[in-house]
Image (tube, helix red, strand yellow):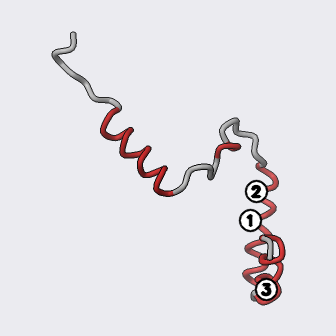
Amino acid sequence: MNHRQQLIQELEQAPDDLIETVLNFLHRVQATGNSHPLAKFSGILSDSEAQGLQQAIKTECRQVDVNEW
């Protein structure tokens, strides 16, 4: 079952208020589109890769060595 089929199956069983919420969300997403130049990179990292990158940034970036100058 692909994502579209799974979504349709879930929506067929969902209450009307949830259907309205999902539809409103879909319309907002479609209206904004992927206009940001970095949007194409959204979701390419796994959770563990993202955590590793965050940790590297936290420990390695913005570290000032006062004796460097």
**Label 3–label 1 contact, CB within 8 A:** no
The image quadrant of residue 40 is: top right
Quarter the N terminus occupies: bottom right
- Crowd class of label 2 (few under 14; some 14 to 19; many from 20; radius 10 Å): few
What residue is drawn where x is 75% and y is 40%? 35
Q: Earlier in the sequence, mark 3 or mark 1?
A: 3
What residue is drawn where x is 74% and y is 65%? 25
Labelled disc at residue 16: 3
Labelled disc at residue 55: none
What residue is drawn where x is 25% and y is 24%? 64
Q: Nearer the viewer, residue 39 or 48?
A: 48
Residue 23 vertical position relative to residue 9 in the rendered view, above or below: above
The image quadrant of residue 11 is: bottom right
For the residues labelled 2 and 3, the Cα–Cα distance comes to 20 Å
Residue 42 in picture, x, y percent from top left: 64, 48
Q: What element carries label 2?
A: helix
Q: In this view, does 60 lie to the left or right of 37?
A: left
Q: Say which amino acid is labelled 3.
A: Asp
Q: In this view, does 17 lie to the left or right of 5?
A: left
- Crowd class of label 3 (few under 14; some 14 to 19; many from 20; radius 10 Å): few
Q: Say which amino acid is labelled 2.
A: Val
Q: Is mark 1 on a helix, strand or loop?
A: helix
What residue is drawn where x is 66% and y is 38%? 38
Q: Is mark 3 on a helix, strand or loop?
A: helix
The residue furthest top is 69
Q: Say which amino acid is labelled 1.
A: Phe
Q: Which of 36 and 57 is in front in this view?
A: 57
Q: Earlier in the sequence, mark 2 or mark 3?
A: 3
Labelled disc at residue 25: 1
Q: Name the residue under label 2.
A: 29
